[in-house]
Image (cartoon, rainbow, N blue to C red):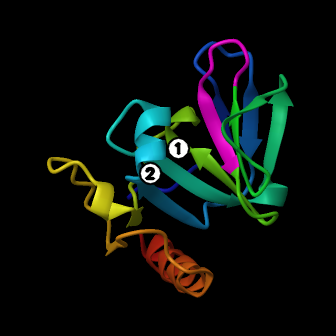
Amino acid sequence: MTALALPALGHCRCGAIEFRVSAPPLLTMACHCRGCQRMSASAFSLSAAFPAPAFELTRGEPVIGGLRNPELRHYFCPACMSWLYTRFLPTFVNVRATMLDETAWCAPYVETWTRARLPWAQTGAAHHFDEFPTMDEFQSLIGAFQRDWARA
């Protein structure tokens, strides 16, 4: 895994929405749930969780799409409909890692909802969960990722 150069810039496919992250990721993940498969039109969604204060929209206004759940808000570009990021806790912004300009640094450290994983979809993640980890497990994973990321 290579280091992410900061600040890191990202944008949607058409460029109408742009953003910046100014801190390293807390965790990288691949989610295999059917919702992520459908919203990403792929075998899984690839994301990087950043501290909320480190995420800044620099251009455009995204719209909420996907599930209409006040605790799980998925943000999309209103023009090209790219899925950009998700806010599920006030402390994190879960950015779709491929929306960042530089992507070579990102490999999933955790994969979730592996019970819905397509048989051929292998990520190489170090940690695997049949569903979603508990908040206590998340805290442990963040600590482990930070230790491993520092060694990379």
The residue at 74%/16% (across/down) is 16
Q: Image check: 52 left or right of 24? A: right
In the image, residue 89 above or below residue 79: below
Image coords of residue 62 (percent x, y): 78, 28
- The answer to whether residue 84 is magenta is yes
Image coords of residue 134 (percent x, y): 55, 80
Q: Image check: 106 left or right of 50? A: left
Image coords of residue 150 (percent x, y): 51, 74
* Residue 106, disc: 2
Q: Look at mark 1 in the image and give the residue it sits on.
A: 97
In the image, residue 33 above or below residue 42: below
Q: Amino acid at mark 1?
A: Ala
Q: Amino acid at mark 2?
A: Cys
- Kindly indicate whether the residue at mark 2 contacts the one at mark 1 (C-beta within 8 angstroms): yes
The residue at 75%/64% (across/down) is 89
For mark 2, give the secondary structure: loop
